[in-house]
Image: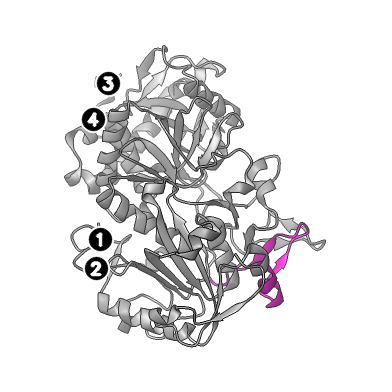
Amino acid sequence: MKDSAILTANTGLERYGLENVKVYWNLTPKALQQITIKNNMGRETLNGTLAINTGKFTGRSPQDRFIVKDDYTKDKIWWGKVNKPISPENFDKLEKELKKYLSGKEIYARDGYVCAAPEYRTNIRTITELPWSSLFVYNMFLRPSEKELENFKEEWLVLCAPGYVCPDPEANGIRQGNFSIINFTKKVVIIGGSAYTGEIKKGVFSALNLILPIEKNVLPMHCSANVGEVGDTAIFFGLSGTGKTTLSADPDRKLIGDDEHGWTADNTIFNFEGGCYAKVIDLSEEKEPDIFRAVRPGALLENVVFKPNGEVNYLDGSITQNTRVSYPIHHIDNIQETLYAKNPKNIFFLTCDAFGVLPPVSKLTPGQAAYHFISGYTAKVAGTEAGITEPVPSFSACFGEPFMPLHPTVYGEMLSKKMQDAGVNVWLINTGWSAGPYGVGSRIKLKYTRTMITSILKGGLDGVDFEQNPIFGLFMPKYCPGVPTEILDPMNTWLQKGLYIGKAIQLAHSFHLNFEKYANEASQQIMEGGPLIDEHHHLEEHI
C-alpha cells in the first residue's frame, strides 16, 4: 500500500474501457485522508478522524437498486419491489456512460476481498471517483497482504461514480438519475449518482446472498456473531434498533463481526467483511464504548455535525438520523483475529416489540425458527420515522429483506436444516416493551437482556421448565437466573389481562397477514411455526 500519491497512468484499466485515467492504486488511509482534506472534500475531528458529507443521499436508495435479468438470474431471483429487473442492454448502456464519465479523471483503485474463510474468499476490485470512497472500501472489505496484491485477480468489479447522474433515466430502464445495479453474469456492480458509501457495501452483500447459497451451499446471514472461550459461536439477528451491535459486544467473548456472515456446510461461521459500519446518532462512550473508541484516525465519519469548538455533536441529526462511521475491525480490541469460528451453539433473533406482548426470552422449535426468521419482525416507534406516534409492526424477511435476492423461504429452509443438523438452539429475545405497549409500559432493562443471553450462553437455561404462550406458541422459561421471574411471562406484567390478550391477538394477526405472501412456498412445518391464534379464532380454546 502506498503512502505517496503516485499516479499511474492507465495501469491496466484500459481493459475496462477507462480511457486516459490517472489512477491512485491501493493508497493508505493516511494518503486518502490527506487528498480528501486537500481537495476540500472533508474535515478532521479534534482527534484527527476524517469526516465527510455524502451529499444528496445520506442512506441507501432501495427503489433505485436493480439486478440484471438474464439467463443466469431470470429463474433464480425473487423479482418484485425489492429485486427490480433491468435488461442487459440497459446495463451495458449505463456501464458505458459511467466509464465515459470516469475517463480522463483522477480515480482511485483498490483491491480487496470478502469472505474471511479462505475457501470462500472472493476478490473484489473497486474503482471509485472519490478518495474517501476508497477509504471506506479499505475499512470495510478484507485487506490483502502486499504479497497477495502482486498477483491480484478480481472476481468482481465495482465501479462507483457519484458524480455521474443519468440524464435520461426512462430510456435506460431506471427510475431517476441515480442507480445501483448488480450484473451476475458479468460480475460487475455499477453505482452512479449517489455518494452514500453503504451502496458499495450492500451491493456486494446482495451479490453474495445469491452466490453463496446457490453455488457454495453457504447460508448468508445479516447478523452479528461472537465466540466464547470454549469455542462456542453465537449468532445475533436483528433489525436496526434491536440491539444487535450492543448485545454481541461482550467482554467475555470475541467478536467475529457485526453485520454479515456465512454459515458453511461444515459449521464454520465466517465474517464477509473486514470492518464495521455503525450508526453514530446519540453515540457516547458510556452507551457504546467499543464504537466510540473506534472513531480515531483511519475511521471515516459520515454526515455528522460539529459543535462550534470543533467537537463532533453526535446528538445532532439535522443532516440525517443515519449518521455513520466505518472503521477496520482491528479498531475494536476484543476480536477473533481470523474472523471465523466453528461450532454454532445459539442463535438469537432480537426484536424490539413496542406492543409489549412478546416474552423477553423464548425458545423456538425448528418450524418456529424458520417462521420468525422469514418474518423478521420488529416494531417502529415514535422517533424512528417521521409521522409515527403509535407502534407500527415492521417485517423484513430474514432480518435483511432489502439484500436478499432469493425467495425468503430458501434462506428459511436452509436455516432450519442447519440448526437441526448442528443441534443449535434458537431464541427469540424481546428487547422492547414490558407491562404495556410503548407509552404505557417500559423498555425491558438492557441489564436483564444481557443476563438472559449470558445465562443461555453458559447453559443456565438447560434444565429449566418452559411453558407455552397461548397466543404465539413460544416456549417461555419459568425461571432465569438474575432476572425477576414475574417478567418472563408478559401477560403477568400487564395490569389488565384482557388488554394484553387484545393487543397480542392484534400482533398475531399482523404476523399472519405478513406471512401470506410466503405461504405458497413455505413447508407445513414452517407454516405451523407461526402464532397459534388469529383474531378469527376463539381464545377460550387455547387458554
The answer to whether 355 appears left or right of 55 in the picture is: left
Residue under label 4, please give it. 537
Q: Is residue 2 above or below residue 391?
A: below
Q: In terms of image quadrants, where is residue 252?
A: top right
Tell which circle, 2 or 4, labels the residue nearer the N-terminal end. 2
The magenta stretch is: 33-56
Residue under label 2, please give it. 69
Q: Are marks 3 and 1 in contact (CB under 8 Å)?
A: no
Residue at 61% across, 47% down: 330
Q: Are marks 3 and 4 in contact (CB under 8 Å)?
A: yes
Residue under label 3, please give it. 542
Tell which circle, 3 or 1, labels the residue nearer the N-terminal end. 1
Amino acid on which the number 4 mark rests in the picture: His
Quick one: 319 or 253, which is closer to the camera?
253
The colour style of the image is one colour
- The CA span between labels 4 and 1 is 34 Å
- The CA span between labels 3 and 1 is 39 Å
Q: Is residue 244 above or below residue 445?
A: below
Tell which circle, 2 or 3, labels the residue nearer the N-terminal end. 2
Badge 1 crowding class, 10 Å Cα cut-off, few under 14, some 14 to 19, many 20 or more, is some
Q: Secondary structure at mark 1?
A: loop
Q: What is the x, y in percent for residue 446?
A: 58, 31
- Which label was assigned to residue 79? 1
Amino acid on which the number 1 mark rests in the picture: Trp
Badge 2 crowding class, 10 Å Cα cut-off, few under 14, some 14 to 19, many 20 or more, is many
Q: What is the x, y in percent for residue 200?
A: 46, 64
Residue 225 lies in the magenta-colored region: no
Q: What is the x, y in percent for residue 397?
A: 34, 47
